[in-house]
Image: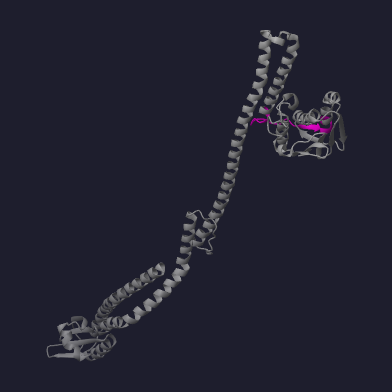
């Protein structure tokens, strides 16, 4: 509405100003042009009169007066003669406002040597009538100006103001980071180009904001993941420190007792093998810690080669055959396919070896450990034992043992399955451990990609 009234007011003021200028300038322009034409006509009249007789001059003068709305007076020694409207003779002689211009000149006719003075005047009535007409038409002109101004303001508002207001509204929404709009201004002029540019800009802005939102979510996930890994790393090293502290304390006690020959430790040959066993456990733990450190480092890369999974599984079972025989555990291998995968052979062999080793180590004597290999899965099952359901989720946590007691002679280092998890994650292989009818089943889904 503000735009509409502003345009209407501008149109009305402009129209009235133009009308006023025309009302003032047109009579003056008409008067100036009339005087110029009248002067030229007078010169031609005098020239024609001097070429003819007095009688011929009367006819020429009558025609001139009729044509130019003029009054002419011929003055001689004997008197004067007026042509045209005789009622204006006195006005001509006195050069009153009623005449636009009065010209006097001397002339002679061809049939007489007597000199004449000619006085020529032109009426102002037409000029004054023009001004009167302008004033008389002013009320109607003003009404017409108001009507046309309102119509013009409405058209301008619809054509120009409406799209400008629409673009202004869109710009305000854009400043508030609102990208759920579309500018519907369909034009081919500059406003249309601006609207199209706004639409293109909001599309790019929307895409950028979506990308930023995705990147921000990813960043938050990475931060949370990094924090979680840092907490796990701290917990891991705290647990490792405790795990190393125990055998070191035992070893130190044994060595000090043997040095000072305290009690039964006087027999060094009896206790040195026990100390060596403690050192070996520490060595194995350190090796596994170094393996985990290498697997979890940011710059670690797999050394992939085409490897036969059947061969890897066979080698793992063969390596545990002596321990299985000692514990009266039967090893079974069922080959249904011979998949060849691009993997890090040493790491995959270590993962499978840890799984088979857990089966041989934890199963009671006289039980079975079986491995079934297909084109897409490797399943290792050991019988005679189950994992409590509440502890299944913790089996891949470092330094967590399934048995209630932390007796390392029964539970190992607690890092085996954690190493398995890291190796399989690096190979992007899914895995699962669950209780089966006869025992515990570990399944790996082989990744052919």
Residue in the foreground of this view, choosing between 196 and 230: 230
In the rendered image, which quarter is residue 90 located in? Answer: bottom left
**Residue 308 sits above or below residue 174 on the image:** above
Residue 409 seen anywhere in this rendered image of the structure: yes
| Residue 306 vs residue 344, the one in the foreground | 344
Q: Position of residue 228 (x, y in %)?
A: 61, 36
- Residue range highlighted in magenta: 294-312
The residue at 44%/69% (across/down) is 156
Whole-percent x, y for residue 24 in the image: 28, 75
Task: Please tell me whether residue 297 belongs to the stretch shown in magenta.
Answer: yes
Residue 211 located within the stretch drawn in magenta = no
Judge whether 364 appears above or below 189 on screen.
Answer: above
The residue that appears at 82% across and 29% down in the rendered structure is 364
Residue occupying the far left of the picture: 77
Image-quadrant location for residue 264: top right
**Residue 38, image x, y percentages:** 26, 80
Out of 399 and 78, give the one closest to the viewer: 399
From the top left corner, tell me how far across and down residue 40 is, in percent: 27, 78
Q: Is residue 276 left or right of residue 220?
A: right
Residue located 42% across and 71% down the image: 153
- Please tell me whether residue 26 is drawn above or below residue 229 in the rendered image: below
Depth check: give the residue in front, 176 or 317. Answer: 317
User: Would you identify the image quadrant in which residue 365 lies?
Assistant: top right
Question: Which residue is painted at 54% across and 52% down in the image?
Answer: 205
Asked whether the viewer can see residue 445, the reply is no
């Amino acid at each position: 509405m503000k735009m509409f009234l502003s345009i209407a007011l501008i149109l009305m003021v402009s129209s009235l100003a133009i009308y006023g200028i025309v009302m003032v300038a047109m009579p003056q322009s008409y008067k100036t042009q009339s005087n110029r034409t009248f002067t030229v006509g007078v010169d031609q009249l005098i020239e024609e009169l001097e070429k003819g007789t007095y009688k011929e001059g009367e006819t020429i003068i009558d025609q001139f007066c009729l044509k130019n709305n003029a009054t002419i007076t011929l003055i001689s020694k004997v008197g004067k003669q007026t042509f045209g409207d005789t009622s204006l003779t006195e006005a001509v002689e006195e050069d009153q406002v009623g005449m636009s211009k009065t010209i006097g000149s001397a002339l002679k006719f061809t049939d007489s040597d007597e000199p004449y003075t000619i006085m020529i005047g032109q009426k102002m009535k037409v000029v004054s009538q023009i001004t009167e007409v302008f004033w008389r038409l002013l009320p109607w002109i003003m009404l017409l100006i108001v009507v046309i101004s309102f119509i013009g303001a409405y058209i301008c508002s619809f054509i120009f103001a409406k799209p400008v207001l629409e673009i202004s509204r869109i710009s305000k929404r854009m400043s508030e980071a609102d990208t759920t709009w579309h500018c519907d201004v369909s034009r081919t002029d500059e406003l249309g180009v601006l609207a199209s540019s706004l639409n293109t800009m909001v599309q790019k802005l929307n895409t950028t904001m979506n990308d930023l939102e995705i990147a921000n979510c990813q960043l938050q996930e990475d931060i949370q993941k990094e924090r979680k890994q840092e907490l796990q790393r701290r917990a891991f090293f705290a647990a490792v420190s405790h795990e190393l502290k125990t055998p070191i304390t035992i070893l130190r006690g044994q060595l000090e007792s043997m040095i000072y020959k305290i009690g039964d430790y006087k027999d060094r040959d009896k206790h040195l093998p026990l100390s060596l066993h403690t050192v070996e456990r520490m060595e194995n733990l350190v090796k596994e810690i170094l393996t985990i450190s290498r697997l979890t480092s940011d710059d670690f890369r797999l050394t992939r080669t085409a490897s036969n999974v059947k061969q890897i599984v066979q080698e793992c079972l063969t390596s545990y055959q002596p321990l299985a025989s000692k514990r009266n555990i039967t090893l079974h291998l069922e080959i249904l396919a011979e998949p060849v995968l691009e993997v890090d052979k040493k790491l995959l062999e270590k993962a499978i070896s840890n799984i088979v080793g857990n089966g041989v180590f934890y199963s009671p004597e006289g039980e079975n450990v079986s491995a079934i290999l297909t084109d897409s899965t490797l399943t290792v099952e050991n019988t005679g034992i189950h994992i409590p359901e509440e502890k299944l989720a913790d089996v891949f946590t470092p330094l967590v043992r399934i048995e209630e007691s932390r007796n390392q002679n029964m539970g190992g280092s607690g890092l085996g399955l954690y190493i398995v998890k890291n190796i399989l994650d690096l190979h992007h292989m899914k895995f699962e451990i669950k209780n089966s009818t006869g025992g515990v089943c570990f399944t790996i889904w082989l990744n052919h990609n």
